[in-house]
Each structure stands twice: as C-alpha cells, then as structure tokens.
Amino acid sequence: MVVAADGTTRSSEVTHTLDGTATQISGNVGPDTVAVTTPSPDVMVMALSGQGVPYLMRVFTLGSDGNSQTETAVYFQPDGTPVIRETQLTRVK
C-alpha cells in the first residue's frame, strides 16, 4: 500500500510465477502487468508495464552476507531517456 502526503492510499496485488510469464496486476498503483524470474538463487528480475508500455525493470541481488541487498531499477524519463538507479539495502535487526 502507498500512502500519499494527503492521506489517500493506493494498492495493488498480484500472484505470479517465477518463470518470467507476464501476469496481470490488480489495483491502482501504476503498472498493470509484471513478469518475474529468478535466474539464480540470489537474483530476482522483475519487469513491469502499464497499458502495454514499458514501465520499470528491477533487479534484486542478495548480498553474500544474507543481510544486504542491491536493487537496480531501470526506468524511463518522459522523453524516453533511460535512467538506472542503484540502491543498497541492509537488514536492520
């Protein structure tokens, strides 16, 4: 669930396989289709589209310590320019 600054909420839900098959998303967050695969035990690749247009691709890589993760997100500016953003995440205990 996404909660905006004004208190409105948006949410989506999907049950998908991990074989790269495109699956419809219900809800109102943005994308309406997702495909997910796990090419190795420590990597998950997710591609999202909305109304038939590419929306976002994310690659999640689990760190060898089991407590960190790298998220690489690929998306497009309104003019079509691709952007790659990388985020390092660490589990807090």
Image (cartoon, rainbow, N blue to C red):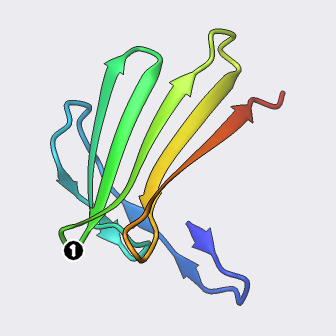
Above/below status of 75 relative to 91: below
Q: Where is residue 61? Give x, y as percent.
A: 52, 25
Q: Quadrant of the N terminus?
A: bottom right
Neighbour class for label 1 at 10 Å: few (<14), some, many (≥20)? few
Direction from residue 78 to residue 36 in the image, left or right = left
Asked whether 53 or 24 is in front, the reply is 53
Circle 1: residue type:
Gln
Direction from residue 65 to residue 13 in the image, left or right = left
Above/below status of 16 relative to 80: above
Asked whether 73 or 20 is in front, the reply is 73
Asked whether 85 or 63 is in front, the reply is 85
Total labels drawn: 1
Q: Where is residue 46? Give x, y as percent.
A: 36, 42
Q: Quadrant of the C terminus?
A: top right
Above/below status of 28 relative to 61: below
Q: Residue at x 69, y 10 (%)?
A: 65
Residue highlighted by disc 1 = 51
Circle 1: element type: loop
Q: Where is residue 32? Give x, y as percent.
A: 28, 67
Q: Residue furthest right?
A: 93
Q: Residue at x 61, y 86 (%)?
A: 8
Above/below status of 79 relative to 58: below
Direction from residue 24 to residue 85 in the image, left or right = right
Q: Residue at x 57, y 38 (%)?
A: 71
Q: Residue at x 57, y 79 (%)?
A: 9
Q: Residue furthest bottom?
A: 6
Q: Where is residue 31? Give x, y as percent.
A: 34, 67
Asked whether 47 or 92 is in front, the reply is 47
Residue 69 position by quadrant: top right
